Amino acid sequence: MIAQELALAYPALVDRLVLFATLARPRRAIFDPLLAFVVQATERLDATAVAMVWLPLLYSPAFLAQPDQVEAALAWQEPYPAPAHGIAAQAEAVRAHDALERLPRIAAPTLVLERGGHAALWEDPVAGAAALLAFLAG
């Protein structure tokens, strides 16, 4: 969302744009209850439990079926848990974001990485890095 707004507001500053784990406009019927749940979980649960709430939202079923990868993801999450007020602010930013009608004004060449979710690069770093490098070098 930030990259979209930067490319729209300051096109001269953006040579190439990569959009990953983002949206142009949230579907409120889906996102409002989901975001409310995540905020409530963050306010009430410890960091490990919150990370476990996020896992099925961020990772593919194939990833979640591998206990060693789940453990690695949980270990990575725990040292720096996001505070509840930060998650609440992020949820509000998602709810308020609407760039859908303005997207055609983005002038920079844009790579949209749509495979997977927020954790697609974690799940397949080789393919993700190859796609990014090919695009950024081009």
Image (cartoon, grey):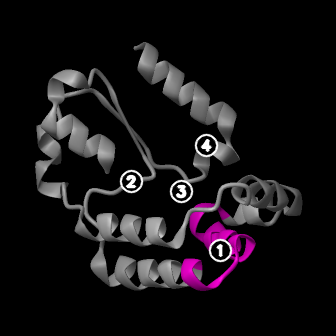
The quadrant holding residue 28 is bottom left
Closest to the observer, 126 or 122: 122
Closest to the observer, 86 or 53: 86
Which residue in the structure is indicated by mark 3? 117
Under circle 2, the secondary element is loop
The magenta segment: 42-60
Q: Residues within 10 Å of mark 1 (few under 14, many from 20)?
A: many
Looking at the image, tell me whether mark 4 or mark 2 is earlier in sequence order.
2
Q: Residue at x 84, y 60 (%)?
A: 71
* Numbered badge on residue 22: 2
How far is disc 4 from disc 1 in space, using C-alphas? 21 Å
Q: Residue at x 57, y 77 (%)?
A: 42
Percent across and percent down for residue 75 are 80, 56
- Kindly identify the amino acid type of the residue bearing the numbered disc 2: Thr
- Kindly identify the amino acid type of the residue bearing the numbered disc 1: Val
The quadrant holding residue 4 is top left
Under circle 3, the secondary element is loop
* Numbered badge on residue 30: none
- Kindly identify the amino acid type of the residue bearing the numbered disc 3: Gly
Percent across and percent down for residue 53 are 64, 76
Left or right: residue 112 versus residue 43 is left
How far is disc 3 from disc 1 in space, using C-alphas? 18 Å
Q: Residues within 10 Å of mark 3 (few under 14, many from 20)?
A: some
How far is disc 4 from disc 2 in space, using C-alphas? 14 Å
- Kindly identify the amino acid type of the residue bearing the numbered disc 4: Leu
Which residue in the structure is indicated by mark 4? 121
Question: Contact (CB < 8 A) between labels 3 and 2?
Answer: no
Closest to the observer, 42 or 117: 42
The C terminus lies in quadrant: top left
